Image (tube, rainbow, N blue to C red):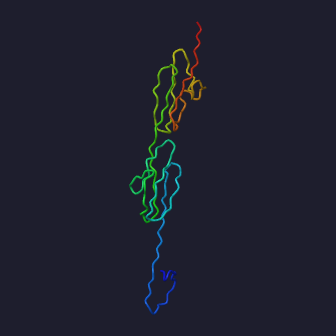
Amino acid sequence: WYLDGQKVTSLTVPAEDITLEAQWSVNSYTLLFEANGGNDVSSIKDSYGKEIVIPNASREGHTFAGWIYDGKTYKSGDKYVITADENVEFVAQWTINQYSITFNEKGGVEIDDIRKDYGTVINLPAASKEGYTFLGWAVSEGGIVAYEEGDEYTLRAEDVELFAVYQINKYTV
């Protein structure tokens, strides 16, 4: 309570009427962002009634689908007005991306490309070409063998093309 702009800590009842005034300060609350496997997002602390711009989040191999709070989804750039009377936590939601392995058989028998979710482990197939022995897969045209038949390849956050590497067969006649 305040009297004439001064905080009153104790009061002796005066002989005349006085007016005590209440002084209020706006409460501040923290918006927490649980990235749910994504990169950390800083919390935001601001006052009740303030409008906050919802931040973006990122996670390798995933697309950000928004933040969930109180059953509602908020997208990056949406506005949120602090109306709760407590700290609130937004939880990130993600959709997993798919990536492709394209096989360049270098004139051999065609192998179907593979398109799967990020992080999927693929056992690499063998390529075949008449008159040649398959040695493995290179990561660039004319490159050296990086993977052999049956090797495990984990899909990264990018499409990839693998190139068959062959050795010509020698026959004695």
| 53 or 118, nearer to the observer | 53
Q: Please determine whether, in this image, residue 13 is positioned above or below residue 89.
A: below
Left or right: where 146 falls relative to 117: right
Q: Residue 97, percent across and down?
A: 46, 40
Closer-to-camera residue (84/164): 84
Query: Which residue does the image show at 50% across and 47% down from the upper left?
Result: 58
Looking at the image, the residue that sits furthest to the bottom is 15
Quadrant where the C terminus is found in the figure: top right
Is the residue 79 above or below the residue 120 in the image?
A: below
Residue drawn at x 51%, y 83% is: 8
Question: Which residue appears farthest toward the top when viewing the image?
Answer: 173
- In percent of width and height, residue 25 lies at 48, 71
Position of residue 163 measured from the top left corner of the image (x, y, whole percent): 54, 25
Q: Eyeballing the image, is 68 above or below 108?
A: below
At 44% across and 87% down in the image, what residue appears? 18
> In the image, residue 34 lies at what x, y percent?
49, 54
